[in-house]
Amino acid sequence: MSDYLTIFMFFLLAGLAIGSALALVAQRNPLYSAISLVGVFIALAGLYLTLAAPFIAAVQIIVYAGAIMVLVVFVIMLLNVEEEVRQPLRLRFLVPVAVLLAAVLFAEAAFIFFFVNEPAGGGGNAVTTLNQAGTGLTANIGAGLFTIYLLPFEITSILLLMALVGAITLSRRAAVRPSELVVPGAQVLPMHIVDPARIGDATPVEAHTTAESAALSGLFDRAHERE
Amino acid sequence: MDWLNNLLGPTVRQGLFQLIGISVAFVVVLMIVAYTVLAERRILGFIQGRVGPNRVGPGGILQPFADLLKFIFKEEIIPAKSTRFIYVLAPIIAITTALMPIIVYPFGPEIHIPFTNISFPLVVARFDVALLYVLAITSVGVYGIALAGWSSNNKYSLMGGLRSAAQLISYELSLGLSLIGVVMLSSSLDLYSIVEQQSGWFGFKWNVIYQPVGFIIYMISAIAETYRVPFDLPEAETELVAGFHTEYSALKFALFFMAEYVNMFTVSMLATTLFLGGWNGPGVAAFPILGIFYFLGKVIFFLFLYIWLRGTLPRFRFDQLMNFGWKFLLPVAILNLIVTATIVFFAT
C-alpha cells in the first residue's frame, strides 16, 4: 500500500515540477514565471521528502521558495515589468547550441541510469562513510558539513560573501546616499533636482518645508534653473 | 477494534487517525481564532474607554458568527483591471500557509483513553524537522500578501505588498536566529521532544529561563512577522487606506482576516512550545489531559499580549522598522547565538 502511495506521490510531484517548469518558460508575464518557479521548488521539496530527506526539503523551501523567490517577486513588483512581446529570435545560432547541450545532458543522465550501478569512489565517499540509512537527517548533514565537506562548505561561504560584498559595492557607487537626503520634519527632496556632484556628503538639515531644506542644501537655484 | 484493524492496513489506519486529528485541531483553532477577534474588540473597547460589541447574544458572545454571515453575504468585487487569477489565488495562499503549521504543534502529552488500550500523544504529525517545517511554511506565506498587493492593480495595495515582502525578509532572519538558541539547548528540531525536555523542576527547565534574550527577540520578530501593531506597516490605514487588502471584499477579505489571526495563534503556539514549556504545568504527570488547558492557557496569554500591544503602542515609521530590524535586532540575535553556542560547547 505504502509503495503505491510513494509511486503515486512521485508521479504527482514530478508532474507538478515538469508542468511548472514548462509554464515558467512559456509564460510571457514575468510574475507568472516567478510563481511557476516557486511551484517547481515546492514540487522538488516534495520529491526530497519521498527520498526520505526532510531536512533538505525544508531547506529547499526556506531558501529558494521563501527567500530568493520572494526577492525576485519583490523586484518584479517594484519595477512593474510589463508583459513581454513575442519577438523573432535574434541570436539564431543559439538554437542548435541549446539542442546540443540538452542532448549532452540527456546522454549524461542515461549513462548514469544504465551503466553506473555502484556508487563511484571508495573510502572517501560520504555515502559509504556516513550512516546510509540516515543520509537526509539533520544531525548527519551537520556532521558531514563540518567534517568531510568542510572545505567545499567554507569555499561556498566565501563565494556567497564575495557576491554580497560585490552587490554592496555596486549599490554604493552612487555619491548620494538617499537616506541622507531625508530632512527630519520635511519631505524627501525629489531626486530630479538633486545634483549628486554638488551635494557630496549631504548632512541632515533642520528645516520644515521642502523649499526651505532645498535652499539650505544649496539646491534652490538649480531647482529654478530646471523649471 | 480487531475487525477494524484487519480491515484497514496500518498506513490507512494511521492516515485516518491523522485526518481526524487534523479536523479536530483545525476546528478548535478556528473557534479560538474567531473568539480572539471578539476578545480583541472587547479588550480594545475596554482600553479605549468604550463598550465594544455586546448586542449579538449575551455579552456579544455570538458576534463572530454574525461577522461570518455578513462576510459570506456581502458582494464579491473583483476589480476590472486586476490580474484575475492571482487576485483569486492570493487569499487562498494566505489562509493555506497560515493553517498548515498547526499540525506539528503538540497540544498535550500522551493521553490514555479510559477503559481501552488506546493511548496517543496529542500531536497530529511528529517528525524530525518540525521546526524547520514551520519556518518554511511561514516564509512561503508572504506570497499571499505580496501577490494580493500586486494583482489588485492599486497603488496602495502595491505599497502594502512591497512593504510586507521587505518586512518579512528582514525579520525572518532574527526570528530564525532567535530559535537556534533553543535548538542548540535541546539538540532537536522535533517540537514534541523539545517540550518533553522542558518538563520537571517546577518550571525551571523552561527555555525562557535559559534564553531570555532569544525569547524577547522572538516575540518582537513574531509580531513583525504577523504584521501586527506596532509593525502593521503593510496595512497602515493612515497612509495606505487598508494596504494590501484594499480591493478585497466579502469572503476573500475574510480569508485574509482569518489568516492574520491564525498566524497570530501559530506564532503564539510556537512561543509557548519553544520557550514556555508547551503543555507542561503542575499536575500534568498525573492527569495528562490537563496539558491541553495549560497549553491553550499560555497561548491565550500571548494573544492577550498582542491585543494589549495594539491598544497601547503607536505604529513604527518604515525606515525605523528597517533600522530596528537590521541594525539592532539582527546583531543582538547573532550575539545571543554566539554566547549560547559557547556556553553549550563548554557545558557538554
Image (spheres, helix red, strand yellow):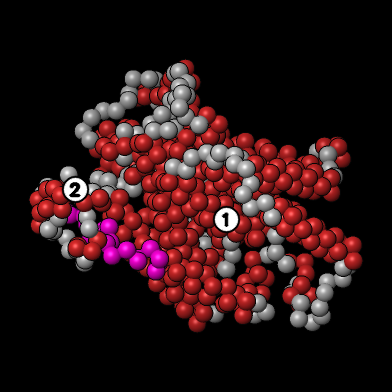
On what subunit does the disc labeled 2 rest?
Answer: A
Q: Which residue is mark 1?
A: A64
**Amino acid type of the residue tagged 1 in the rendering:** Tyr
- B183 is within the stretch colored magenta: no
Report the residue marked by disc 2. Answer: A226
Give the foreground label among 1 and 2.
Answer: 2
Answer with the quarter of the image where residue B195 lies.
bottom right
The residue shown at (27%, 57%) is: A178
What's the residue type where badge 2 is placed? Arg
Residue A125, position in %: x, y? Answer: 76, 77
Dot 1: element: helix
**What whole-number distance in Å separates the C-alpha atoms at marks 1 and 2?**
46 Å
* Snapshot quadrant of residue A126: bottom right
Q: Is residue B138 visible?
A: no
Is residue A89 toward the left or the right of residue B244 in the image?
right
- Asked if the stretch drawn in magenta spans residue A170, the answer is yes
Which residue is located at x 31 percent, y 59 percent? B323
| Magenta stretch, residue numbers | A168-184
Name the side, left or right, on which A113 lies relative to B317.
Answer: right
Residue B252 appears in view: yes
**B224 over A165 or under it: above or below:** above
The label number, if any, that marks residue B33 in the structure image = none
